[in-house]
Amino acid sequence: MREIYLKAPAKINLALYIKGLREDGYHELQMIMQSISLADRIKLKKKSGGIVVKTSHVDLPTDEENLAYQAAEIFFEDHPEISEGVEIYIEKNIPIAAGLAGGSTDAAAVLNGLHLLFKKRMNYESMRKRLEIIGSDAPYCLEGGTVYASGKGEIIEELPFIGEKYLVVVTPSFKISTPKVYKLYDQLEKRYDSDFEAILDNLKNDNKINWNLDFKNDLKAAAEKICPEIIEIKDIFKNTKAKFTMLSGSGPTVFSIYSTRKEAEKVAAKWPRKNDFVTVVKTIDKY
């Protein structure tokens, strides 16, 4: 096998709670993460040596800054007996710096794909550990699905799949820096008591999701201050038949869940903000 084709699905956050600041400078998180059908497509091709990254998106770095490149470096470090290299082509469908784990999912797909391409035994536990170096979302992106993530996001507990839900995903052209959002969050004094355990209990034990529970994103206020367009997008969703609307990650992507694909497609087709990235997707199970 000389080449392999992969999908790298995006993720959304159904809930993101911040418990506090850790001694290592990171934030202690509680999150519900969910994979969606929006995905980058990746081609891995063996080459004589080294790592080359090519991409369909002009704003995506192709050097060591690229998380897929870093994942390939990790793979070859772990397998020094391999003399060949790899060419990585990324067809970028997930918006960049959007709170959808676009870079992390590419990295996870590349690490997974290189094990397949070079016929190396896969140990998901150790692969997740290696992906922690790249980013907090990356270990989750290895298998996706519906999960409860804690710590920095690297401690993962699988939850029952929430089922196929149809979403409209909207990303404004404004790019948000995740560190800046967290920094501003730390400066904002307003904090709200919340009941994350009720959400977990609902997702683990009930047949139907209770969207009236305290699903929330603690980064919302900080992200909206940096990018007020988030508020505009949420206001548009308010005037639709959305069952649930949420900011994903540190933003600026906002998504809404609808009862049917037809409802979601109707909202997307009539979206009034012409410069936004707008797409209709569905939730997907562990891959």
Image (cartoon, grey):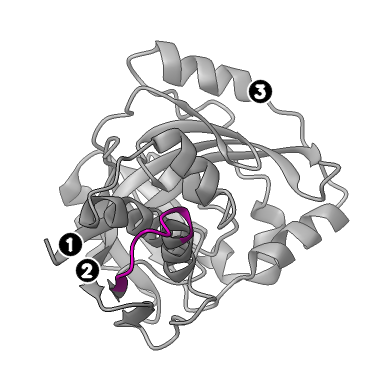
Give the SS element for disc 3.
loop
Query: Does the CB distance between marks 1 and 3 fall below 8 Å?
Result: no
Q: Earlier in the sequence, mark 2 or mark 1?
A: 1
Q: Amino acid at mark 1?
A: Tyr
Q: How many C-alpha atoms fall within 10 Å of the one at disc 1: few (<14), some, or many (≥20)?
A: some
Residue 25 is left or right of residue 37, and the answer is right
Q: Position of residue 11 (x, y in %)?
A: 41, 50
Tell which circle, 2 or 3, labels the residue nearer the N-terminal end: 2
Q: What distance separates the C-alpha of mark 1 from that of mark 3? A: 42 Å
Q: Which residue is mark 3?
A: 195
Q: Amino acid at mark 2?
A: Lys
Contact (CB < 8 A) between labels 2 and 1? yes
Q: Residues within 10 Å of mark 3 (few under 14, many from 20)?
A: few
Element under label 1?
Answer: strand
Residue at x 55%, y 64% (from the top left corner) = 230
Which label belongs to residue 43?
A: 2
Q: Could you tell me residue 29's position as x and y percent?
A: 67, 38
Name the front one of labels 1 and 3.
1
Residue occupying the far front of the picture: 81
Give the extent of the magenta segment. 77-86
- Report the residue marked by disc 1: 5
